[in-house]
Image (cartoon, rainbow, N blue to C red):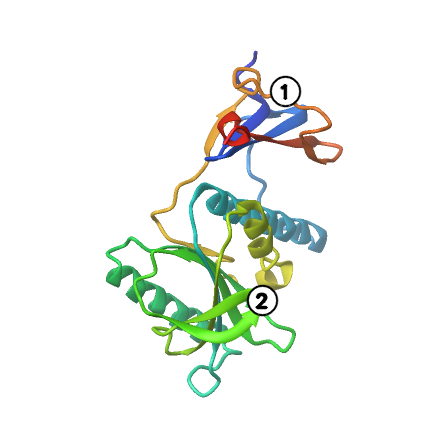
């Protein structure tokens, strides 16, 4: 096989494999196109690709790590101008930094911003090893108890414990990564702590890993590629 071309890419997660099969072999090294002189159509495509890459990275992190909390952060307008991107980003980053110091860098998180229709900024996160106090509330949402993180002094939090369906969690978080947020600001579309695991990636190794794609494993297809998912054998017999 010509190693200068990629026919398939396998990502290995703790409980599954994801296989991408290219219908036309893809060159390993491709020259990036210049950003100069791009028309509106090209810029729009770049944004779409950027959103897709961000969603893929967030999904990879969630599928490769164990998170136990989903948290929504809402800013108190009396304390933060929640329509000011810079102010919201700064407050969120400072809070995350303090929690990391308290946890001795053990806290794990992936967090994404959301811009509401009225322009207000919110953040949604999956987390684990949170070092602060958690306050139980009397609120039940979607048959789940709601809790508050008492250390967040810039507004309000809505925390719910996660179940074990990582793919469902990944899909839910990724829906907040939108094209609209990209065009609003040049800031990152997500933040992730530096202590997260990533999937192991293999090139042209589908056969050696005994991954046989068929209609049952197919999850997506277009004119360029197919995507397949396989549970690991130990998961099937667990």
User: Which of the two discs, 2 and 1, sits closer to the camera?
Assistant: 1
Q: From this viewpoint, is residue 193 visible?
A: yes
Sort mark 1 into few (<14), some (14-19) or many (20+) by Cα contacts within 10 Å: few
Say which residue appears at 56% left-offset and 56% top-offset: 173
Residue nearest the observer in this picture, 173 or 231 = 231
Which residue is the site of mark 2?
184
Mark 2 to mark 1 CA distance (whole Å): 43 Å
Q: Quadrant of the N terminus?
A: top right
User: Which numbered disc covers residue 212?
Assistant: 1
Q: Residue at x 49, y 43 (%)?
A: 63
The image quadrant that residue 180 belongs to is bottom right
Residue 36 appears anywhere in the view: no
Q: How many numbered discs, if any?
A: 2
Place of residue 120 in the rendered image (x, y in percent of width and height, measured from the top left): 56, 76
On the picture, is 38 further left or further right than 206?
A: right
Task: Judge from the rendering whether residue 92 lies leftward or rightward of residue 48; answer left or right.
Answer: left
- 112 vs 99, nearest the viewer: 99
Mark 2 surroundings within 10 Å by alpha-carbon count, few (fewer than 14), some (14 through 19), many (20 or more) = few
């Amino acid at each position: 096989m010509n190693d200068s071309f990629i026919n398939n890419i396998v990502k290995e997660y703790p409980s599954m494999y994801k296989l991408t099969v290219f219908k036309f072999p893809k060159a390993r090294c491709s020259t990036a196109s210049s950003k100069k002189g791009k028309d509106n159509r090209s810029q729009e495509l770049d944004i779409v690709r950027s959103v897709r890459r961000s969603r893929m990275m967030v999904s990879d992190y969630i599928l490769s790590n164990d998170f136990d909390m989903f948290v929504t952060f809402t800013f108190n307008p009396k304390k933060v101008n929640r329509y000011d991107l810079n102010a919201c980003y700064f407050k969120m980053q400072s809070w995350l930094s303090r929690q990391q110091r308290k946890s001795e860098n053990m806290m794990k998180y992936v967090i994404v911003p959301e811009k509401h229709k009225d322009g207000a900024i919110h953040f949604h996160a999956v987390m684990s090893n949170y070092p602060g106090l958690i306050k139980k509330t009397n609120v039940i949402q979607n048959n789940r108890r709601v809790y508050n993180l008492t250390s967040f002094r810039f507004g309000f939090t809505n925390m719910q414990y996660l179940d074990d369906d990582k793919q469902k969690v990944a899909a839910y978080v990724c829906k907040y990564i939108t094209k609209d947020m990209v065009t609003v600001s040049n800031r990152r579309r997500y933040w992730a702590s530096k202590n997260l695991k990533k999937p192991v990636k293999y090139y042209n190794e589908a056969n050696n890993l005994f991954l046989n794609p068929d209609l049952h494993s197919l999850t997506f297809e277009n004119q360029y590629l197919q995507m397949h998912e396989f549970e690991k054998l130990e998961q099937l017999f667990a």
